[in-house]
Image (spheres, helix red, strand yellow):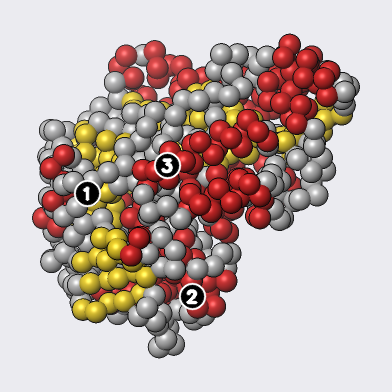
Amino acid sequence: MSRVSIRTARASLAALAAGALFLTGCSSGGGGDDSEGKDEKTKQQGSDVSYTFADAAGSKGPAEEVDGGRKGGTIKVLQRDSFAHLDPAQIYVSDEGALATLIHRGLTTYKRVSGDKYAVVGDLATDSGQQSDGGKTWTYKLKDGVKFEDGSAITSKDIRHTIERTFAPFITEGPTFIQQWLADTGGAKYRDMLKDGPYKGKHLPDDVLETPDDKTIIFHFKKPQAELPYALAMAGYAAVSEKEDTKEKYDKKPLCSGPYKIASFKSGKSMKLVRNKEWDAKTDPARHQYPDAFNIQFGVSFEDSTKRLMSDAGENQTATSFTNQVDASSLQKVRTDPEIKKRSVSGYQSYVSYLNINMDRIKNKKVRQAIAYAIPNQSIVSAFGGAGGGEMAGNYISPTLVGHKKTDPFDKLKNPQGDVKKAAELLKESGKKGMKLTFAYQNSPEWQKFAVAATQNLEKAGFDVQKKDIIQDTYYDQIGKVKNGYDIYHNSWGADWPSSSTVIPNLFDGRQVQDGSANYSHHKNPKFEKEMDRIRSLSDADKAAEEWQKLADKILTEDVPAVPMHYYKAVQLSGSNIGGMYYDEQLHDIQPTSLYVKK
């Protein structure tokens, strides 16, 4: 995932605790229902969630009406964090990603077909994309009648401009996948291809990005990019008007293309969204425009929003939150009070927590195995509020990702409190009994609780554990150093879309080991790196999904660079007069575009 994904990795856990979650699933594969044609493919295996790539039939609007959905009313939205960015190209956190579903549109987007079945559909485009040349070329056609809020038609020139401006130096916060794919390079080297973006009259050559007419956009890559429809569905690639682009100023006042537009925004205080009259439901397969307005209030903590929504008093009856979760101390009451529970939704986030083992310092595989068996996964689930806050992990791959299977190489699910006996045997066999382990962890309440339980198990297994708590603000900076001086330390990671291609290479590609890299365990294995390259080159997303899971399990069992600990989950609440609420397994939060105010 490059620089931004490293940023995702560094911040993900702190952000989880803080609420400003980085976009994930945004967090592989392939349309909608069975009527969408024989091209549709990519079902997730081993999990109930599935994704398909939609053809033109599955990408037509309007979106199917929500049961009970009605127009009118205003929804109060309680958010802890203000929106730092409104320019699509600068959006890479889930608070802003939730907002983006209401105000921005891109070539593709996600649509829930039914239950846990989702499709990547054509949004501004007529379908999720037509690939040729083995996945190296992708062609998109724009729908008729798609407009910005000022009534101007969205054309291929706007889409070209949208992509080209992401090369400009002032765009620093959003995703970089498509830029890197077009330039066929890693890191920030892609900027050399169009150093100033399109602002000095230069453009990407037609053999890279082509717009032969006002309706057609053609992407040309040097390598197959089977997951382009997922990348294009990220908020970071939503349409920006070429004529109305104000560069840095666009971040405060963008031209909207979604069902709502921004009426007012007072950073840190409030935002009001009102209907965008230029949005045409007939062109949109995924969104609705039920409420007259959304009044968003910032600075509301998880505890405060939970308390207000649990009370269901006054204006709280027509209130919700896009991303605030039920705070850990209230989870039990929400789960056990039937009146509150029926106003809650829950589901997986794409984040997985890992205990990294520094392979530069711990070279003995049996020692790493001993650590893996000793870790009590249940303790981290308990620390995060029990079943509502997470679920024990058996492997590296989140259940939200295509290809996930319920494998458990180290019997973590069978032994939720860890297998201390097995760990002691392995440590003895290694000849390292009594070895010192420097254990670094965040000094937040959740990780402090986990550290106590994990240390007890490790000491019972025969390790001499030296605990080192690190303040949250600098934690990822500290463990991100190659010479960090620690033996074991945790991190969390979330995929950028429902594919392990945005997880396994980031965490375990030895060619990425450097300060600030997400390969926190410093895992290096040329055999597995070669396999990563092979899987990346596959044009069949179904096959790739299966192969990523196999590779992940091989890395875990053969090298043991990190211990999978738990899959994050979230519970969210709304007031009793909010309808259309469901937990979106792709957005990993409430889906804002389906909400309405009940009569």
Judging by the rendered image, the residue that carries numbered circle 1 is: 39
Give the crowd class for mark 2: few <14, some 14-19, many >=20 residues within 10 Å.
some
Q: Position of residue 533 (x, y in %)?
A: 53, 54
Q: Position of residue 37 (x, y in %)?
A: 16, 47
Vertical order, 221 against 55 (above or below): below
Instruction: Look at the image and tell me whether residue 11 can be seen.
Output: no
- How many circles with numbers are drawn on the protein? 3
Left or right: 421 in relation to 85? right
Residue 168's mark?
2
Identity, as a three-letter code, of the amino acid under mark 3: Ala
Determine whether 140 is above or below 376 in the image: below
Asked which quadrant contains residue 147, the reply is bottom left
Neighbours of disc 3 within 10 Å: few (<14), some (14-19), many (20+): many
Residue 564 falls left or right of residue 547: right
Of the residues tagged 3 and 2, which is closer to the observer? 3
Q: Residue at x 48, y 71 (%)?
A: 183
Residue 376 seen:
yes
Measuring from the top left, give residue 224's x and y in whole percent: 41, 60
Say which of marks 1 and 2 sits in front: 1
Q: Give the secondary structure at mark 2.
A: loop
Between 365 and 372, which is closer to the camera in this rendering? 365
Q: CA distance from mark 1 to mark 3?
A: 17 Å
Label whose residue precedes the other's in the sequence (3 or 2) = 2
Disc 3 target residue: 545
Contact check, label 3 and label 2, Cβ < 8 Å: no
Residue found at x 49% / y 36%: 549
| Rendered view: 413 above or below 145 | above
| Badge 1 amino acid | Asp
Nearest the viewer among 364 and 9 is 364
What amino acid is at disc 2? Ala
